[in-house]
Image: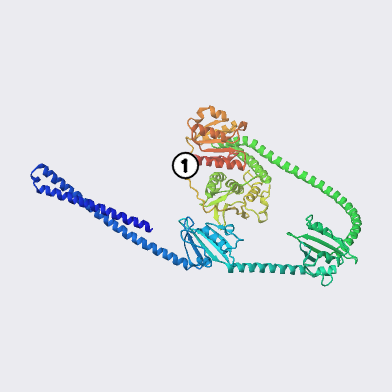
């Protein structure tokens, strides 16, 4: 750093000297020009130009002079900064020397060439007894190691370069000095690729560690000796030279060792010659000592009848451990057990014969029971097969019967709308009652068979109860009025959670039963809110039920006694179906009745979830008076009679009806969809395994938009009902009740559905 500062000062002086020379030169030129002008050149053009050049030159001299002064100022500022830096460097070096001097360890700093830069006085104390020359800038780190070994400071048996351990970005080593002290040498790299080495005296730590290790070994030896002394076995530890190292008192008792013979480093073979094992050949120990076996076990019978078990274990590194154990009692016990075993074999053989006889008897009994169980299982399977066959037969028969019944019901309904003579109207009414009886019979038989077979599965969902009650009100209002009864309906704004179809079946049976057993008065359909459920009630002013018959009426084919004016006396299955459906849904059914005054049938339905929101649809009847006049309806059914009956009924309501019986006819007849129908009435089961869903898809594809659709089927399958519901369609079961058909079509023909 001193050399660099000198060069910088000399450079500044030379620059200053050159600038002064140029300045003097310019001054002389300026003076000469002024003299020439004064001597008479001012009147000529050449003299004027010379003066003008002199003036310009004077300006340049002035500018160069200014730059020269500015440069001199910067040089003075640089000299001041250089002096300040030199002073701070000297202070930093002094502080570094003071810092490492105050450290108790020996500290040495090396540059990137590993040459010594500086060290504290603790480091030089290692060398004060030697004539080694250690100089800054000359001595290297490797030279220090060589000198330490040369002058006997390091123990030559432990080279530091061989014991250096790397820990992250530094190295540590432990070195022993010739005077018995221990040093820990720690190397740390500096930011400029230099090296800092610290020599720490850890003699006290090392001595404590050695003392601790010796204490641990002593404790282990003491523990081992204590354990050997307390073992129930006789133990002798022998070194590789066959000399005794350790033993316990039990071996002395077992072998009868004379007092004074068992001493440390005594010859083990000599000890055995003076014990009860003197006549026992233990030459196998030679093979153990040669490494042929690492475990030796044998038993010796002594002259006094005792049995001694001898075990020899090879100690890793050389030596053996002999154990001696008195097993006399164990051998006597084993002999006794052997004799007892022979006696037990005889007893076991005798007992085995007895058990074999009993086992044979048990096998015979098991075979008899197995045969009986097989017979029971066979009978059960036959009963289940018969039950399934009955269900399939009833379902198939009801499906085949419902087709013509559905057509007959439609024709009878159409006849009732005509102005007929009294005798003909009476016949039509009788026909309607007969069809109702057949319909009720088939429907209830199918319901009972499905419920008994356990194939009815509820599909629960949240829905507004008022939609269900409004449909039932529309369906049964006219029915009740035809029977001369008043019908009242109280709307409800409550949402419930149930299967709407099965719940409607329960309420429909309530209403049918109420109309059947009410001669005069009125019916009421409404709800009461309870704490945990909504109780839907059907009130009537009928004949009532005696208290002792309240439970019997829910039994199949049980009917109330009493006089009835109408012919539809029922089959006694309606309330039985209610009982089974309520069990499937898990809804409680209640009944209160007073004989001669009337009854109240009710079902308790859970409330919908709190987060359920239902978008209310406007009542189609409130927006226009006649939803049917002029509406075009397409009917697709494979039964020609049903198509004709549906046409008669719908046309009597003012609708324009077109029909098709096959999918091929639907594809080929263009007039069916021109103009586009307002509603589709589709039979689900068509010929050749076709379905109404395929018919709806054909219409939607041709019209390029969906049309409100009503599916009609004799299939009561829940999966089909759920599938149709998820697709956004409506479904009713055969035989079709005209009032229900009219209610559903009113909804489908409402502007809310026509606009979709």
Measured as percent of width and height from the top left, residue 529 is found at 54, 56
Q: Is residue 698 visible?
A: yes
SS at circle 1: helix
User: Eyeballing the image, is 672 above or below 130?
Assistant: above
Q: Quadrant of residue 271?
A: bottom right
Q: Quadrant of the N terminus?
A: bottom left
Q: 425 left or right of 369?
A: left
The residue closer to the viewer here, 600 or 703, is: 703
Measured as percent of width and height from the top left, residue 715 is found at 62, 39
Name the colouring of the figure.
rainbow
The residue closer to the viewer here, 689 or 528, is: 689
Measured as percent of width and height from the top left, residue 192 is found at 45, 56
Q: Which residue is mark 1?
A: 752
Residue at (19, 50) in percent of width and height: 26
The residue closer to the viewer here, 723 or 314, is: 314
Q: Residues within 10 Å of mark 1 (few under 14, many from 20)?
A: few
User: Eyeballing the image, is 99 above or below 390?
Assistant: below
Residue at (75, 68) in percent of width and height: 227
User: Eyeballing the image, is 622 above or below 271?
Assistant: above
The residue closer to the viewer here, 309 or 409, is: 309
Residue furthest toward the front? 131
């Amino acid at each position: 750093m001193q050399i660099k500062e000198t060069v910088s000062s000399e450079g500044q002086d030379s620059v200053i000297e050159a600038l002064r020379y140029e300045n003097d030169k310019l001054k002389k030129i300026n003076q000469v020009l002024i003299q020439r002008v004064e001597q008479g050149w001012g009147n000529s053009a050449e003299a004027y130009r010379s003066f003008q050049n002199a003036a310009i030159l004077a300006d340049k001299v002035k500018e160069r002079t200014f730059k020269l002064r500015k440069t001199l100022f910067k040089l003075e500022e640089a000299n001041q900064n250089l002096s300040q830096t030199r002073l701070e460097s000297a202070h930093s070096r002094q502080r570094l020397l003071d810092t490492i001097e105050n450290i108790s360890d020996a500290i040495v700093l090396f540059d990137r060439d590993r040459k010594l830069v500086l060290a504290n006085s603790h480091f030089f104390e290692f060398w004060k007894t030697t004539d080694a020359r250690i100089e800054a800038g000359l001595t290297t780190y490797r030279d220090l190691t060589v000198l330490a070994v040369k002058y006997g400071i390091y123990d030559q048996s432990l080279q530091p370069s061989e014991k250096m351990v790397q820990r992250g970005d530094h190295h540590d080593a432990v070195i022993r000095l010739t005077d018995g002290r221990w040093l820990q040498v720690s190397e740390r790299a500096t930011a400029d690729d230099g090296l800092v080495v610290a020599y720490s005296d850890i003699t006290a730590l090392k001595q404590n560690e050695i003392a601790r290790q010796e204490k641990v070994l002593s404790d282990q030896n003491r523990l081992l000796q204590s354990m050997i002394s307390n073992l129930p076995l006789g133990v002798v530890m022998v070194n590789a030279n066959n000399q005794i190292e350790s033993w316990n008192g039990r071996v002395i008792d077992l072998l009868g060792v004379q007092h004074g013979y068992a001493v440390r480093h005594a010859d083990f073979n000599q000890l055995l010659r003076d014990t009860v094992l003197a006549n026992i050949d233990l030459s196998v120990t030679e093979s153990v000592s040669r490494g042929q076996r690492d475990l030796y076990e044998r038993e010796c019978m002594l002259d006094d009848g005792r049995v001694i078990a001898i075990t020899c274990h090879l100690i890793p590194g050389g030596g053996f451990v002999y154990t001696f154990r008195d097993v006399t009692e164990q051998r006597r016990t084993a002999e006794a057990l052997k004799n007892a075993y022979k006696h037990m074999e005889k007893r076991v053989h005798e007992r085995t014969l007895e058990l074999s006889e009993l086992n044979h008897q048990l096998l015979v009994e098991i075979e008899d029971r197995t045969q009986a169980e097989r017979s029971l299982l066979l009978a059960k399977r036959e009963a289940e097969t018969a039950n399934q066959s009955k269900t399939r037969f009833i379902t198939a028969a009801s499906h085949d019967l419902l087709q013509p019944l559905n057509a007959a019901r439609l024709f009878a309904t159409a006849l009732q709308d005509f102005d007929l003579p009294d005798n003909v109207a009476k016949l039509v009414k009788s026909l309607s009652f007969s069809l109702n009886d057949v319909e009720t019979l088939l429907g209830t038989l199918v319901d009972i068979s499905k419920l008994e077979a356990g194939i009815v599965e509820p599909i629960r969902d949240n829905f507004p109860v008022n939609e269900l009650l409004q449909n039932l009100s529309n369906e049964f209002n006219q029915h009740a009025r035809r029977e001369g009864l008043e019908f009242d309906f109280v709307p409800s704004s409550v949402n419930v959670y149930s299967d709407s179809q099965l719940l409607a079946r329960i309420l429909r049976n309530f209403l049918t039963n109420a109309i059947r057993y009410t001669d005069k008065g009125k019916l009421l359909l409404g709800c009461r809110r309870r704490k945990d459920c909504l109780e839907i009630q059907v009130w009537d002013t009928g004949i009532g039920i005696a208290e002792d018959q309240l439970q019997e009426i829910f039994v199949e084919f049980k009917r109330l006694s009493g006089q009835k004016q109408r012919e539809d006396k029922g089959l006694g299955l309606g309330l039985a179906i209610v009982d089974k459906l309520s069990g499937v849904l898990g809804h409680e059914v209640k009944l209160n009745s007073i004989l001669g005054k009337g009854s109240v049938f009710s079902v308790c339905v859970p409330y919908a979830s709190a987060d359920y929101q239902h978008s209310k649809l406007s009542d189609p009847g409130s927006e226009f008076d006649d939803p049917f006049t002029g509406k075009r309806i397409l009917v697709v059914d494979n039964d020609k009679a049903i198509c004709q009956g549906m046409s008669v009924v719908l046309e009597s309501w003012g609708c324009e009806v077109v029909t098709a019986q096959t999918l091929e006819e639907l594809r080929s007849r263009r007039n069916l969809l021109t103009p586009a129908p307002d509603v589709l009435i589709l039979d689900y089961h068509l010929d050749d395994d076709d379905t109404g869903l395929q018919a709806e898809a054909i219409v939607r594809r041709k019209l390029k938009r969906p049309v409100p659709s009503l599916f009609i089927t004799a299939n009561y399958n829940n999966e089909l009902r759920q599938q149709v519901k998820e697709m956004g369609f409506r479904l009713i079961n055969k035989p079709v009740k005209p009032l229900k058909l009219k209610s559903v079509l009113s909804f489908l023909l409402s502007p809310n559905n026509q606009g979709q």
